[in-house]
Amino acid sequence: MEEKKLDLNSIIGFVLIFGILIWIFYQNQPSEKEIAAEKAKKELVAKQEAQAKAEKAKTASLPAVDVTPGDTLQLAQLQKTLGGFAYSATLPSAKETFTTIENEKLKLKIANKGGYIVEATLKEFEKFKKGSGQLVELIKNNNSNLNLQLLTTDNRTLNSKDLYFEPTLEKIGADQVLSMRLKAGANEFLEYKYILRPNDYLVGFDIRSQGLNRVLNSAKPVDLQWDLKTYRNEKSVSYENRFAQLDFKYEESKYNNVSSHGQGKEETPAKVSFVAFKQHFFATILSTEKPFETSKLQSDDLVKDEKIDTVFTKQFRANLPLAFTNGEIDYKMNLYMGPVDYKTLKAYDKNFDKIIPLGWGIFGWINKFIFIPLFGFLSSTIGLSLGIAIIIFTIIIKLAMSPITYKSFLSQAKMKVLRPDIAELGEKFKKDPMKKQQETMKLYNKAGVNPMAGCIPALIQLPFMYASFQFFPAAFELRQKSFLWADDLSSFDSVVKLPFNIPLYGDHISLFPILAAIAIFFYMKMTSGDQQMAAPQQEGMPDMAKMMKIMIYVSPLMMLIFFNSYGAGLSLYNFISNLITIGIMFVIKNYIVDSEKIHAQIQENKLKEPKKPSKFQQRLQEVMEQQEAAKAQNKKK
């Protein structure tokens, strides 16, 4: 029987649908006027924030002053502005100075004013590309603030970020311990304590008060206000921004995130154990032993136009109330500032690894228990080039899946043998679709063929395919690792820079997606002939043969468009995966599956007593008989 040909109307329909989708995507791109308006709006907001800060500084902040110890007149003047914390402004530390602590991985700079980290540098990683000479800086140039909003007993509202802390640095064993104290008296203070251990990304961070019962109003919790405007660290700002989000753990064992896109997205979880300001490959995480009872978490997208917005990706904000215990504050916390690497985060045993989007359910299990251990073994234990490791990793996965591929192809081969019989039934009962379905099911049962057998193996492979889409973008090992023409497997492998931007595609041409698209095209071309007419077309259902012909061209096109800006590691995996599948299918088709033998076996099965149909087949047969009876009844009426 000749293959069904696409009619002109079907072709025009699919072209129109695809064209409409492209037009919708194009129309959703912001116009130049919208971009300019958004930029003006941001400038206005920034100006208003600056004015608000200036007003606060007039009432709640004190510039560095030279005060003579014991000068009660000066102290009385300061108390008019700072109340109980006027004492802090009389100390020698009341000036713009900094204390630096560092180990093999981290370098932190803490300011006297505010007592918080004003610079955090990762000493082992470079931004943008390998050899750039620019280290990754999570905090710098006032992109982050950590502030306690202090309500005093004399009805003042003071901000700790505007007040001066007294630093004391000491070494306890191998640890560096920096105490920053905002003093209301010689033994009355609010303290930030930083504990930096050797060769560690995790910094101990305790907040406690001592003797402040008379100074602070303990009727309400103290608001810990923490914000971070994340710097761009990777080659593509839009790709990095896609994976930047605010994650959190709450109610002991629940995990969630604030939507990674849009403006002013906010969540208010209770009993929060950690808050993670996650970039693509780096994160700043604040964790606490005593959960925050309430919280307000917000994420704003700063990338509206990747040509203009090239410095920052997200603006994260967290408001975390600190409760009083017996009139004092006492929170033992940690600050993690380091790579979003699964093994590194897992080693801390604080569930930090949950911020890595490995997928839910079975997809996450495949990544955790198969992909991560296997790829980790290939990349570190054997010491292979990361590109070679991806190729070997792909070969192992595909060979492990080859029995499923074999069963799928064997089912297709059996269905192919039955094509003439199915076509004959179609012609015989072309005026009675229900009868055609019933007779087709009888034919399957008599020949011992299960029409679903080809679908189930394919469905088993889907979780592995989806898991790979989660695994490769999250694989920190790929960052700034080169292979062939790709200088960074975690980013796109641009081989041609275009002088213009193509909607959805971008302003460059990546080679690995092209190779993957070609491989997918030949794979689908190779298998579509066997899949078409594998089952009869159902009444009222789409023509699968036509849809498969369309998918032969649509799937490679989608791969070409959407993977152009994805990481080269994922495109390399898909290229090798489809290449291996083509090879496996070729071997199975030409050297393993014998069509004549299958045909003889089916003919032999037809002569035997038909097998008892499965419960599913029986139920399907009953449904079709009921429909047939109802149809006959309607005709009589």
Image (cartoon, rainbow, N blue to C red):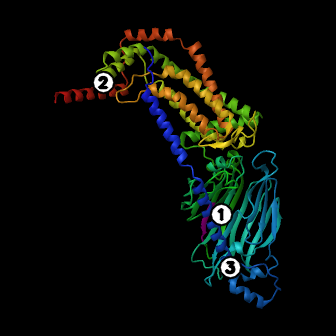
Within-10-Å neighbours for mark 1: few <14, some 14–19, many 20+: many
Q: Main secondary structure of the magenta part?
A: strand
Quadrant of the snapshot with the C terminus:
top left
Q: Circle 3 is placed at which residue position?
A: 60
In the image, taking residue 538 as reference, residue 500 lies left or right, namely: right
Question: What is the quadrant of the N terminus in the image?
Answer: top left
The image's mark for residue 619 is none
Say which amino acid is labelled 2: Met
Query: How far apart are the two marked residues, 2 and 1, measured between alpha carbons?
Result: 65 Å
Q: Check the image and report above or below for 585 versus 94.
A: above
In depth, the one of 338 and 562 nearer the eye is 562
Q: Secondary structure at mark 3?
A: helix
At 76% across and 80% down in the image, what residue appears? Answer: 89
Instruction: Work out whether 65 lies above or below 318.
Output: below
**Image x and y of residue 105, in percent:** 79, 53
Q: Which residues are magenta?
A: 316-323
| Residue in the foreground of this view, choosing between 553 and 83 | 553
As measured in the structure, the alpha-carbon distance from the residue carrying label 3 to the one carrying label 1 is 20 Å
Q: In the rendered image, which residue does mark 2 sit on?
A: 434
Q: Between disc 2 and disc 1, whose residue precedes? A: 1
Three-letter residue code for mark 1:
Asp
